[in-house]
Amino acid sequence: MNLATPPFTLRQLQYAVAVAEALNFRKAAVQCAVSQPSLSAQLAELEGALGVRLFERDRSGVVVTPAGRTLVAPARAVLEEARALTRDAHQAGDVLAGTLRLGVIPTVAPYLLPQVMPALRKTFPRLTTLWREEKTAPLSVALANGSLEAVVVALEANLGDVDHAVLAIDPFVLAVPRKSPLDHDGPVGLKELKQSEVLVLEDGHCFGDQAIAYCEKKGAPQLEFRATSLGTLTQMVAAGAGVTLLPSLSVDTEVKRAAVRVRPFEKPAPHRTLALAWRKGSPLGPALEKLAAVMREHTAVARVTS
Amino acid sequence: MNLATPPFTLRQLQYAVAVAEALNFRKAAVQCAVSQPSLSAQLAELEGALGVRLFERDRSGVVVTPAGRTLVAPARAVLEEARALTRDAHQAGDVLAGTLRLGVIPTVAPYLLPQVMPALRKTFPRLTTLWREEKTAPLSVALANGSLEAVVVALEANLGDVDHAVLAIDPFVLAVPRKSPLDHDGPVGLKELKQSEVLVLEDGHCFGDQAIAYCEKKGAPQLEFRATSLGTLTQMVAAGAGVTLLPSLSVDTEVKRAAVRVRPFEKPAPHRTLALAWRKGSPLGPALEKLAAVMREHTAVARVTS
DNA sequence: TGACTTTGATAGTTTCTTCCTATGAACCTC
DNA sequence: GAGGTTCATAGGAAGAAACTATCAAAGTCA
């Protein structure tokens, strides 16, 4: 759409409104904090631009013409709206108010959001957060092209050039079926891992990629089948289909729902680093740091010891 | 109310909208028909004024910040409204559209308005006329102080310094009771007038003043009682209370309703000159002339001959 | 009626704003 | 790494808007 600039300025509108109120050029000029000739000139300009006489200047008193009257009310509205716009933009500069579009990966969203949302709402009551749940790659694209302000991802994934604030270290644990040979205390060692079939997520999940990489390094056999979420994965483990790696973040939620035991890995345990990331140099950086601080404060990663 | 000028210009808003659309300073500059540095400078100015960064300028692509997004939609609205305002003011300059506040004296209103209103509505379909019915003096004040654009009055009254367009010559006639000695054909002469008691309007009606002046000049006796409208006056004549002068304009309406005969005066007959009058030098002058022309065309003054 | 005040318009200057062209630094593409 | 993008910056010319001073016309009051 082609929006041409109106042939007048806001200042001219303001002067016109002032004169319509004062019905006196001098007083209007005083109220606008300019000299009377300046105001006269601007109004003459405005009338010229509109091709319409707005005021009749009798030496004794100013009279608003019909054209003037039709102009004044909308002019006041325009000025008022412009002022409101200033205020809105101003407070939008502070991300703590307004709308923030955020991304989050699927292996984090269902566990993190319920934890942090109440705190965010309470700490930033005037902030609206819109969350988009996608795998890392699409999030990265959305972040780069500006359709998201920030994303919650694992730093171990490839993100390109971003700034970030770490939210939590999220160690991986092994979920094993109840009443299986693996259903006992103590950290998982290499030997046990090798004799299990590991269920993993479908392609594209950074957590799945990490799990696969870990298993390959350790020589653990993977099942061909790929699940679409940590929830289904856990249910499959409970059903005895194999074992799986889970991020500690998900443990509290998933273990409640399934007959599995979770056991930590022997040190050094695999893990991911959850962080809030944004475009490098974004002016929102400082504000996003604050946001991240509140999120970090309320992110509870289950500590699996046993 | 104190409406401060917003700290930015409409041009800056336009540039911001253009950039938000093009997501590219150069293309936006082309669309705004300015050089790219000019646009950059204006946007920097705007951002400074708002204290908020509206766009992130990565060398590869522009991204709108949340503050920018909250600004763009209202900015578009402001620009659109400003444009609409231009159009409205423009067409308000042509009185044939918009609202016109008009005054009319009571001895004209009930007879003239039904005649001219349909024509006005038809000829100027986008014109709204607001009519105020008052005696000459208050109309004159209202005209002077700008609360009316024009008035329909008799030029014989004292109006001060106005421009005008004549609508009609309105000869006076004499209304006499049916079945009275005066109830016969032919113009009214001095002798007949002197032997009648003349009923007149209350003070302030210019028509009443003219009637009284005429009677005094001719030596006709006036009844003390003063009526408040031509209608009641006519009814009193029909009841045999005396005779009265009527403007021809009112004859068609009033004679239908009452048992009176109307007779012309001997030449030179008294009369009034109906005109549309407006403030001297008013920019509406040319338009009001057009309005008057249409009114003149549709003003029917009864021709009383007999 | 004549001095005085008040009205908005005009003239001449000065200051500030906006624009232009030219150029620079960072990034992408080939 | 050459060439073509991107937006930002610098310097200077043109324009807009402000100021002070003054004017002509109309109202006010003695």
Image (cartoon, coloured by chain):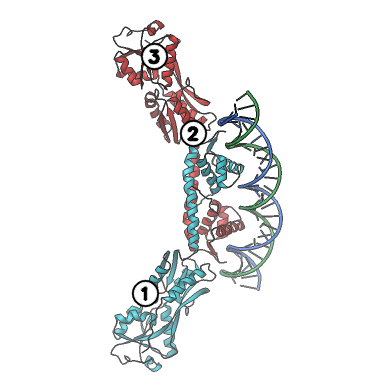
Chain colours: A cyan, B red, C green, D blue
**Residue wearing tag 3:** B173
Question: SS for tag 2?
Answer: loop
Q: CA distance from mark 3 to mark 1?
A: 96 Å
Question: SS for tag 1?
Answer: helix
The amino acid beneath tag 1 is: Pro
**Residue wearing tag 2:** B146
Q: Residue at x 41, y 70 (%)?
A: A120
Q: Pinpoint residue A272: horizontal percent, then vertical percent.
A: 44, 81
Is residue B179 shown left or right of residue A102?
A: left
Q: CA distance from mark 3 to mark 2?
A: 35 Å
Q: Are marks 1 and 2 on the same chain?
A: no
Subunit bearing disc 2:
B
Name the residue nearer the viewer: B30 or B266: B266
Residue B177 image-quadrant placement: top left
Subunit bearing disc 1:
A
Q: Pinpoint residue A40: horizontal percent, then vertical percent.
A: 59, 41
The amino acid beneath tag 2 is: Gly
Residue A209 image-quadrant placement: bottom left
Question: SS for tag 3?
Answer: strand
Asked if residue A18 is positioned above or below residue B57 in the image, the reply reads: above
Asked if residue B222 is positioned above or below residue B294 in the image, the reply reads: above
Q: Pinpoint residue A255: horizontal percent, then vertical percent.
A: 32, 82
**Residue wearing tag 1:** A110
Q: Which mark is residue B44?
A: none
